[in-house]
Amino acid sequence: MAIGTPSSTGATGDPTMVARERPWLVLAILCLGFFMILLDTTIVNIALPALTTGLGASLDQVLWIVNAYTLVYAGLLITGGRLGDLLGAKRLFLIGLVVFTAASALCGFAGTPGQLIAARALQGVGGALLTPQTLAILTVSFPPNRRGAAYGIWGAVAGLATIAGPVFGGWLVSAFGWRWIFYVNLPIGIAVLVLGLRYLPDLRFNRKHRLDWRGTLLVSAALFLICFGLIEGPSHRWGTVWGPVSIPVFLAAGVIVLLLFVWQQRQHRDREPLIPSGIYADRNFAVMSGVIAAISFGMLGLFLPLVIFLQSVLGLDALHAGLALAPMSLASIFSAPVGGRLADRYGGKDALIAGLLLWAGGIGLVLQVTRLYINRTELIIGLVVAGLGLGLTFAPLQSIAMRNVVPNVASSAAGLINTSRQMGALLGSAVTGAVLQTQLAARLGSSARENVQSLPDHFHKWLIEGFEKAAATGRDLAVGVGQTGAHLPADLPASVRPAIEQVASKTFYDAYIPTMRITLIIPVAVLVLALIGALFARSQQRTAAPAETVPGAAE
């Protein structure tokens, strides 16, 4: 059964002709634009210390340099997808590209933290308009029996961006300064714009769409409230934000508005709702929405505790921590095209299940080898297994989810899929951060009491109280490069400072390693649930449909 209702007269002037003749060129253009979006996400994190110094930003401002983009991007993905159905995926892709590229220039020119935060929010607008169109155009450009390979390459680009961000970003910041992490988007954006204008198919249909403005406002408000609560929850310890307004109030309001949106969509289903009628009635699309959220949850659930381990426990700087994670990304680059070919030949379900097993198993291996004197070979093996599994999931996920999507709702479907991915990542970050903070706070005090015995007696109470205060407030927990849980005063006597630093380090290690192990159980459990859910996806029914079947038509 096809999702959505295609136009009875088809597309004006056969808009898929260019895509049929040059599908791999279309894929290359889409991947270049998608790569720019993903690269910007990963490259900013490596430049945060330089941004802090260069702009004189506070910690809250630094966090909002990251979160402003995420908040706007996640909140507008569904709307961006639907606008692609209304105005054409190519048009929205190019509009999003221009907005994102111009916003990148504004980021580079920013002279204050406030200006940079505003420009990052504008980048989020551009990214939300562009991202759904990449998957929509890709789906329509390739016939069903060749989509898996295209999705695999698309997934490999995501893996490449995760490597290029920390490495390339570290080099740019060191050689030219932090502003160049944004300026680098300008030549990429201009190149994609020129190629896109010339070669991307103009996917517009005869049927006139109308935007559901009420639904747009409701879902945007709901996602904003939920995302804000998840992003700001850890920094406010899930309590008061200001006055009577607290994080639970934001989350509850977001859920209420989301339920109101669902009710409004049901009332509006006989007209043109924001979410196409029946899209979640398709079992594969509904199941894959949950699976992709679980995979994103697993990524954040692994990366957050592992990066803290690499930097705070092993003492690596941000660049070397990124290089330590490179084997996982390299493995996903290798396995993503393989998963695409397997999806084309045998159907995506078996490849997806194999990928989820390897992804969860790799995290489990990392969990087993986590210790102070870690065997790097064992860690690399775990990361490679996880990366192979992650790469295997990319193409089957998209193939199964988009199998029954017809062209005139492809952008909406892609927006919903990407929203699921973002919400899974935000949930993974929030849940993992909360468990890390809670477990670490519970262990730091007792760990300090066990380790202070080697110090002179008059330092015992002072050090124990310092760690207990850091654990109680959460705000004084220091988990940066080489930091060990609590800030040590700069005026410590030189004669005792090395001994105190050693005890502080041992205290943090003894508390963090069991905390990390408990935390890593969560993404494994979520991925097991995703694996169970994937079993309910319908297997692909192989047909003798010729390769020139209209892309996106009902199968």
Image (cartoon, rainbow, N blue to C red):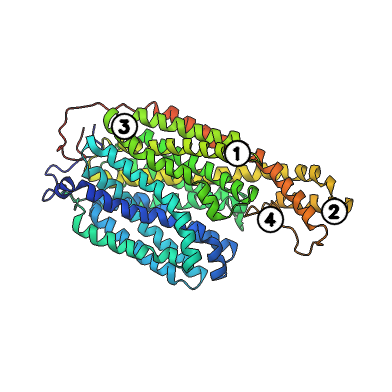
The residue that label 4 is drawn on is 476
Residue located 27% across and 51% down the image: 28
Residue 142 lies, in percent from the top left, at 22, 42
Query: What amino acid type should be assigned to the residue bearing mark 1?
Result: Asn
Residue ID for mark 3 = 342
Q: Which residue is mark 1?
A: 375
In this rendering, the label closer to the viewer, 1 or 4: 1
Mark 2 and mark 4 residues within 8 Å of each other at the beta carbon: no
Tell me the amino acid under the disc marked 2: Phe
Q: How far apart, in angstroms, are the residues tagged by discs 1 and 4? A: 31 Å
Residue 271 in sight here: no
Q: Nearer the viewer, mark 3 or mark 4?
A: 3
To which quarter of the image does residue 58 belong? bottom right
Residue located at (38% from left, 26% from top): 536
Q: Earlier in the sequence, mark 3 or mark 1?
A: 3
Q: Residues within 10 Å of mark 3 (few under 14, many from 20)?
A: many
Q: Is residue 309 left or right of residue 291?
A: right
